[in-house]
Amino acid sequence: MKKFIIERNLPGAGNLSPEQLRGIALKSCEVVNGLGKPYHWVESYVVDDKIYCIHMAEDAETVLEHAQKGGFPADKISEVRSVIDPTTSV
């Protein structure tokens, strides 16, 4: 599977309550389980007006399908080409 970063514009995201975030997570998991194809939601980062999600799927179309079925915005879907960290420098 390929790794994707999804940028979701969601004004006020940083002010969502724990209950609201739980609801979003439950819906995402429900959609993942119903896709019927390989898919993995890794994690998401909530900032002031956006949510950045890391998902793994066969292609960007499947990521978009997840977003549409869940009612989530998917303003930009980018395939991760490489990962670097401090150990890359040695």
Image: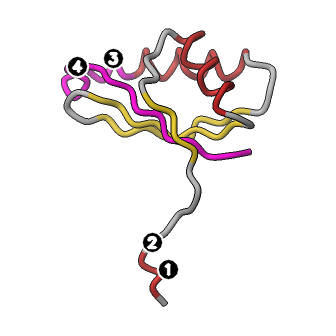
Residue at disc 1, secondary structure: helix
Residue at disc 4, secondary structure: loop
Q: CA distance from mark 1 to mark 4?
A: 35 Å
Label 4 neighbour load within 10 Å: few <14, some 14-19, many 20+? few
Label 3 neighbour load within 10 Å: few <14, some 14-19, many 20+? few
Q: Earlier in the sequence, mark 1 or mark 3?
A: 3
Q: Earlier in the sequence, mark 4 or mark 2?
A: 4
Image coordinates of residue 38 in percent, x first then y, are: 77, 33
Q: Amino acid at mark 1?
A: Thr
Q: CA distance from mark 1 to mark 3?
A: 38 Å
Residue at disc 2, secondary structure: loop
Disc number for residue 19:
3
Q: Image quarter for residue 4?
A: top right
Which residue occupies the foreground of this view, 80 or 34?
80
Q: CA distance from mark 4 to mark 2?
A: 30 Å
Identity of the residue furthest to the bottom in this view: 90
Query: Marks 1 and 3: which is nearer the front?
Result: 1
Residue at disc 3, secondary structure: helix
Q: Earlier in the sequence, mark 4 or mark 3?
A: 4
Name the residue carrying label 1. 88
Q: Earlier in the sequence, mark 2 or mark 3?
A: 3
Magenta span of residues: 1-21
Name the residue carrying label 2. 85
Q: Amino acid at mark 2?
A: Asp
Q: CA distance from mark 4 to mark 3?
A: 17 Å
Residue at the location (56% across, 51% down)? 80
Q: Amino acid at mark 3?
A: Glu
Name the residue carrying label 4. 11
Say if the magenta span includes residue 20.
yes
Q: Earlier in the sequence, mark 1 or mark 4?
A: 4
